[in-house]
Image (cartoon, rainbow, N blue to C red):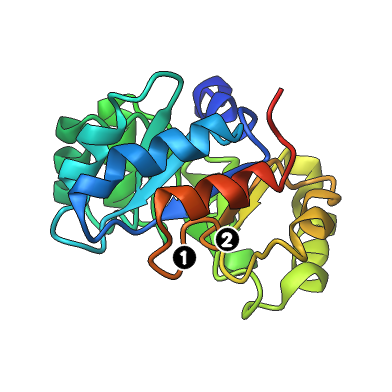
Amino acid sequence: MTDLSHIDAVMERSPIIPVIVIHDVSQARSVAEALVGGGLSTLEVTLRTPCALEAISEMRKVEGALVGAGTVLNPRQMQEAIKAGSQFIVSPGLTMPLAEAARNHNIPFLPGIANASDIMRGLDMGLRRFKFFPAVTNGGIPALKGLESVFGSEGVRFCPTGGITEQNYRDWLALESVACVGGSWLTGGDATAEIVAGRAAALNLRK
């Protein structure tokens, strides 16, 4: 089985991992500072925009930030993300080439799963930590409870992402198998750094 200590360090650092889409790289550092200042120091930058890799590099300059790449679809993107400074990798799905690339790069890897078959394939690869995605459209909390009852004995833990909101994130975190949740609401709607800071502060996570 894969050593879980590195991915656990990512998942247990903060109960909420902001899922960030950056359209303007000049905003990257200030958004990261706003999130870290609000107690959200684990940041997932999705590779959905042309400036995403540069945004990762900018966010790495923020003291206290742990910055990873999301929406990583293949080994080439993983390599580019690592070169840009990514400290962990998140994918919406799970493939053998991605799992092997993460192992070769010795980087924490959180692959996406949607059902029991996905989890079983991940277990065969030695994985025990998964992103449940898209969480709400895949059946929400009842679905994850069902998976939890089947795979809990395997030591599986999840980061539900997709449809997680300020209103429901606590319900997800209450599940025994959930280590953290991913949320795009913190930076959604082209929010400025000031708006992001306010949303983060409202969670009262600052220690």
Taking the image as shown, residue 202 lies to the left or right of residue 40, namely: right
Mark carried by residue 10 = none
The quadrant the C terminus occupies is top right
Category of crowding for the residue at label 1, using alpha-carbon neighbours closer than 10 angstroms: few (below 14), some (14–19), many (at least 20): some
Counting from the top left corner in percent of width and height, residue 17 is at 55, 45
Residue at 63%, 77% in the rendered image: 138
The reply to whether callout 1 and callout 2 are in contact (CB within 8 Å) is no
Q: Residue at x 70, y 61 (%)?
A: 166
119 relative to 74 in the view: left or right: right
Question: On screen, 21 above or below 105?
Answer: below
Residue 188 vertical position relative to residue 121 in the rendered view, above or below: below
Q: Is residue 28 left or right of residue 162?
A: left
Which numbered tag is attached to residue 188? Answer: 1
Is residue 126 visible in the rendered structure shown here?
no
Q: Identify the residue at image location x=27%, y=48%.
A: 27
Q: Which residue is mark 2?
A: 161
Q: Amino acid at mark 1?
A: Gly
Element type at mark 2: loop
The secondary element bearing badge 1 is classed as loop
Residue 187 drawn at (x, y percent):
47, 57
Q: What amino acid type is highlighted by mark number 2? A: Thr
